[in-house]
Image: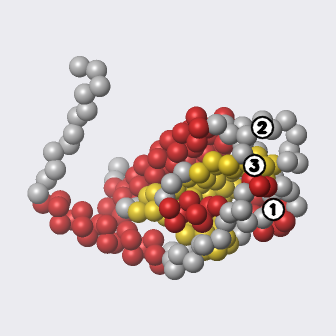
Amino acid sequence: MTGARTRLLRSPEFARIGAELEEHVDTWIRSSSPSELIGLFDAVSISLLKEAFAHVGGCEGTVWLADSEERNLVAVYNSGDDAVSLIGFEQPVGSGIISMVYSQQQPYCENNIGASSGHDDTLDRKIEKHTTAMIAVPFYFAFGLRGVISCVQLEEVEGSKDGFSSADVEVITRVSNIMERLVNETIFSNALGLSDVG
């Protein structure tokens, strides 16, 4: 039968362990800096991100993770030429479009960033480039919202397409969901010692 899903039966003995696992993982996440959490993204995750950014016509993309106090979103990965200067950049929560996406937990697409009152151009000035279009989607893993994935088009990059579509937003959202599963698998395997088996 096509489309049928097989579900593993839950063991009553694991119910208590599940709650303890969630608490353990949340404590570990909150005690880790965003720069430490980038280690959760393996080569497959990064490859998926880069392919998605290219597929939608983005010049580059960034993974932003919230710090433990949720005061800033920190750039922990960037696929562009300015990655070295971008990594570690802190965007205050409450300022800019990615912070709005983080707070409202809704995807966002803007094809005329210059006219957007919500755009914070601090990062543009830092890399001396101009963002013309952006997709930003919430990024969840480890039982909660942990950051934002953004993809941009830059005025200075030749050959980039003109703006993003709703289908492009769906692509980045879908990749964010796949990333969540991959990161969760890494976290849970490590937390339960399953990665040591074999």
Q: Secondary structure at mark 1?
A: helix
Residue displayed at 86% across by 57% down: 129
Q: Secondary structure at mark 2?
A: loop
Say whether residue 35 is visible: no
Q: Please say if 37 is above or below 4.
A: below
Instruction: Tell whether label 1 touches label 2 (CB within 8 Å).
Output: no
- Choose mark 2 or mark 3, whichever is in front: 3
Say whether residue 78 is visible: yes
Disc 3 designates what residue?
Answer: 112
Instruction: Tell whether label 1 touches label 3 (CB within 8 Å).
Output: no
Q: Quadrant of the N terminus?
A: top left
Disc 2 marks a residue whose amino acid type is Asp
Cα gap from disc 2 to disc 3, whole angstroms: 10 Å
Q: Earlier in the sequence, mark 2 or mark 3?
A: 3
Q: Position of residue 169 (x, y in %)?
A: 58, 42
102 relative to 164 in the view: left or right: left
Disc 1 marks a residue whose amino acid type is Asp
Disc 1 designates what residue?
Answer: 124
Residue displayed at 65% across by 71% down: 95
15 relative to 79 in the view: left or right: left
Q: Position of residue 15 (x, y in %)?
A: 17, 61
Q: Position of residue 65 (x, y in %)?
A: 57, 65
Q: Please say if 160 is above or below 95.
A: above
Residue 14: numbered disc: none
Instruction: Tell me the crowding category of disc 2: few under 14, some 14 to 19, or many 20 or more residues within 10 angstroms, Cα based.
Output: some
Disc 2 designates what residue?
Answer: 162
Cα gap from disc 3 to disc 1, whole angstroms: 14 Å
Residue displayed at 34% across by 55% down: 194
- Front residue of 118 and 121: 118
- Front residue of 96 and 1: 96
Residue displayed at 62% across by 61% down: 98
